[in-house]
Amino acid sequence: MTEEILTVKDLKKYFLTSRGTVKAVDGVTFSIKEGETLGLVGESGSGKSTVAYTLVGIYQPTAGEIVFKGQDISKDFSKRLKPLKKDIQIVFQDPGSSLNPRRSIKQILELPLKVHHISCNRGRMKQVVKLLEMVELPFDYQYKYPQAIGGGEKQMVAVARALATNPSFVVLDEPTSALDVSVQAKIINLLMRLQQRLNLTYLFITHDLSLMRNVATRVAIMYLGKMCEVACTSEFFQNPLHPYTQMLLSSIPVVSDEEEMLKPKKILSRGEIPSPVNVPPGCSFHRRCPEGMELCSQVDPGMVEVGEEHTVRCHLFQGAKIAASTSQGEE
Amino acid sequence: MIAPLLEIKNLHVGFDIYGGSLKVLDGVNFAVGKGEKVGLVGETGCGKTTTMKSVMRILPIPPGRFTEGEIFFKERDLLRVNLKKVRGVKGKGISMIFQDPTAALNPVFTIGRQLMDVVKYSKGAGENQAKDTIRDRAINALKDVAMPDPERIMENYPIQLSGGMRQRVCIAMALVTGSALLIADEPTTSLDVTIQDQVLRLLGNLVEEKRNSTILITHSLGIVREWTNRVYVMYAGSMVEAAPTKGLFSNPLHPYTQGLMKAVPKLTGEGIAEGVPGRIPNYLNPPSGCRFHPRCPHVMRICEQERPPFFDGGNTHQVACFLYKE
Amino acid sequence: MERSAHATFWSRKLEAFGRGWYKFSRNPLSIIGLIAVLLVSFLATFAPFVAPYPKHAGVFVNFAEASQPPSLKHLFGTDVVGRDILSRIFFGFRFSLMLGAIVLTLVVPPGVILGLTAGYFKGTWIDTVIMRITDIFVAVPPLILALAICSVLSPNIFNAMIAVSLMWWPWYTRLVYGLSSSLRNEFFVQAAEVTGASRLHILFKEILPNCLSPIFTKMSLDMGWVILIGASLSFVGLGVQPPKPGLGTMVADGRIYMPDQWWITVFPAFAIMLVVLGFNLLGDGLRDLFAVEEV
């Protein structure tokens, strides 16, 4: 029975800007079990990156609770204890800017080792070589600078850096979105192997649903700061319930006819994604929803459990019992 | 036999850098007929943008250099024509849409102003064209790209529009000139999936309506499959496979194309294959013969010695690989 | 493993140097700037050995040779008391370069550190305090303040340097503030923060190295400006005092003898131009050199 390593309850993150309050994350609840990969899907404005950054401490949550290995960590990194920073790591989306162009790969990989006093000088040099081996990069790469290596290799260095402190939880924010297909394949396979070997837990964020299908054990989809649907991967793809999920799934370009058959009936996507400053009242998706009812423009639906670990936030599925965690969050 | 609208013959382009010259394009052969929707697929660094920049003559020279080859547009060699004359061709004959619509639009001018500027300087716009007609043409262009409330959009600034709408404005700007060929360089990479779908659908409809030819450059095989009727696959500076879209996807012939297809994550959830091993070659000292041979699972002796020309794989499906020599 | 690592260390440094030279030398003007600066530095450093009449730089009078036009004996002619102008110019370079070097040494470290800190803590009280103080100093025109300080204290080169330094540091703070506040949000800085790196590390090892190229470029251009301001101060009598050979002082001294004994003013003026232009062109070249390569 695997334990839950991370529990997030009713997490909120608002940003105050000159144009109004941006409700980037507006009440998100989920949990992740040790060793699994939770996939987080959404388009721009969904808040998925904000969730990621709040988990690793780049942002301070506005409200809500984050519990990691039994400890409450709902604060930003300036208030977090050092051992926690060893245990939670992140790989960013843009390899070009996640490595300092003025530092060599060796210096970049040594930093986490130095900060957490992992081995002395000579030991560190050996560790750097081991890290490079782990991501299958040649030993002499440590002397290179980021500009001299390709995007995929930069991302592998970023992965090596994230794993340098032997963390248990790694957030991967669109790690392969900027990369070509064959490089992506290499990195994803590497990440899966490492997960097995080192018993890592991943929060994997991407907008590429085909990728998600092959990587995640469970999938959660977000829209304008709220979760729309959460389910195990196979259930999510075989039986998508929320209209947004269906819209997204029907829009993805695929490369074979058999995949076409697996997509839900084509829902023509209409309208633009509203700005998170101007969230429509009621259900935030109602203006684009092909199934919109009058209720949807007035009342925001709550998360409802419709099957084995399958929850949806939509008025179409009212009637089923409210998931326990949501009601606790509302108190 | 109608001559193709655009034909690139054996194009070689080099870049001068520290330590020598990068032989980026190594004999590119490419053709687009009237009314065709051609896809150009390739990974980063294969030379697709360099090729299109060469067609548009916006490649920086130096450090770029055209060492060999010809680019025929409406049967005139763009490389041998005076740059001033080319400028005339560019606006009137070929227009381009770029990957990042935010960067392609000037943030300090209104949409209307930018659109009208394009109309003024394009084909069919006489010097003394009445201001109203120009404005009307701009508004019609916005209507063509399904912009809600075009009159209001004319007064907006790019920052007030969403990414998808900005890209639609760029499409309007590209089409209002009435050009025969539209080059779209990764037009939807920076857009969300649902918006991407909308924009590509729009582009498809417009192209059919106005019977333009389009070149869609992308690294996404899925997009190519849905939105083009013919595809070129490019690797390390030359085309390795060219086929009608259906044919390419049902029967990819070149080992590189096959590797790419396998590496694409599938909705069937069968896991992701390892993809093509190795890295793209160093353009300073590219591999001899077929540039793909160091990574090819079916490499033969001849591959290291000679560069394969296009062989016929049947049904206008061409592949540059010695495996198909007969 | 270590020995081979060192051998490749030097070959790597050599390659980096070669690559840097390639970038720098694309523009011939940069090379001209470099040559000019190297020439001036050489002359300034070795003035006692290279100048034909080193003694003329100090107290020296020889009315027999006074006001001689340029000749083979005195390439740039002599001034009204018989001193060789060419030699004095070499020594004059010393003052110019020294002024520039000392001012920049006084100005750059504090200016940069303040800018880094203010940028990193943008939006907090630290930012407000630092930047408002900077604003106050920026509001005063440097030359006017320098004149004021020099006329209150005794007019000499050191007070001139102090005056110029007081006015110069805010520009570095502003430059670095802009860079630091935008770099602060880059992913690589956040990655370091998530890992738990100390603030000092982030400021000096992550952010600062990315600011160096604009800083060095500005320093090179500033050398030119500082030297020009120093010459201006000497010109109005508030900098290098006679009989010391400041270039500005020499230009001022020769004014009244124009246009007949033109060489007394013109050659020192050209010398100033050479130095300032040299540093400007070099600065442009440095900017090219530091541009981050994209593959």
Image (tube, coloured by chain):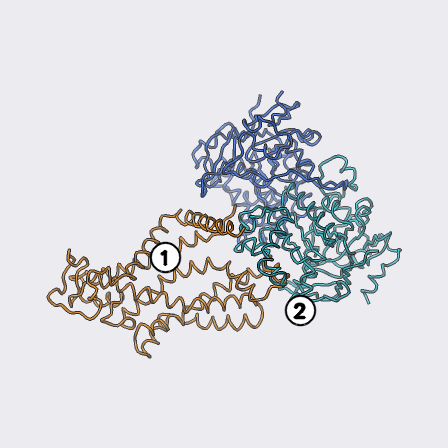
Chain colours: A cyan, B blue, C orange
Q: Which sits in the foreground, C186 or B303?
A: B303
Does C255 sit above or below residue B77?
below
Q: Which sits in the foreground, C49 or B65?
A: C49
In the rendered image, residue B58, in percent from the top left (x then y), is placed at 49, 40
Q: Is residue C50 left or right of residue A82?
A: left
The answer to whether residue B152 shows anywhere in this view is no
In the rendered image, residue B167, in percent from the top left (x then y), is placed at 61, 46
Q: Chain of mark 2?
A: A
Residue A79: which numbered mark, if any? Answer: 2
| Dots 2 and 1 on the same chain | no
- Residue pointed to by mark 1: C280
Q: Residue at x 15, y 58 (%)?
A: C73
Callout 2: helix, strand or loop? helix
Which amino acid lies under the numbered mark 1 shown in the image of this protein? Asn
Q: Quadrant of residue B40?
A: top right
Callout 1: helix, strand or loop? helix
Query: How many residues crowd around disc 2 within 10 Å: few (fewer than 14), some, or many (20 or more)?
Result: few
Is label 2 or label 1 in front?
2
Mark 2 to mark 1: distance in Å?
47 Å
Which amino acid lies under the numbered mark 2 shown in the image of this protein? Lys
Q: Chain of mark 1?
A: C
In the rendered image, residue C140, in percent from the top left (x then y), is placed at 41, 72
Q: Is residue A309 left or right of residue B25?
A: right
In the rendered image, residue C120, in percent from the top left (x then y), is placed at 56, 65
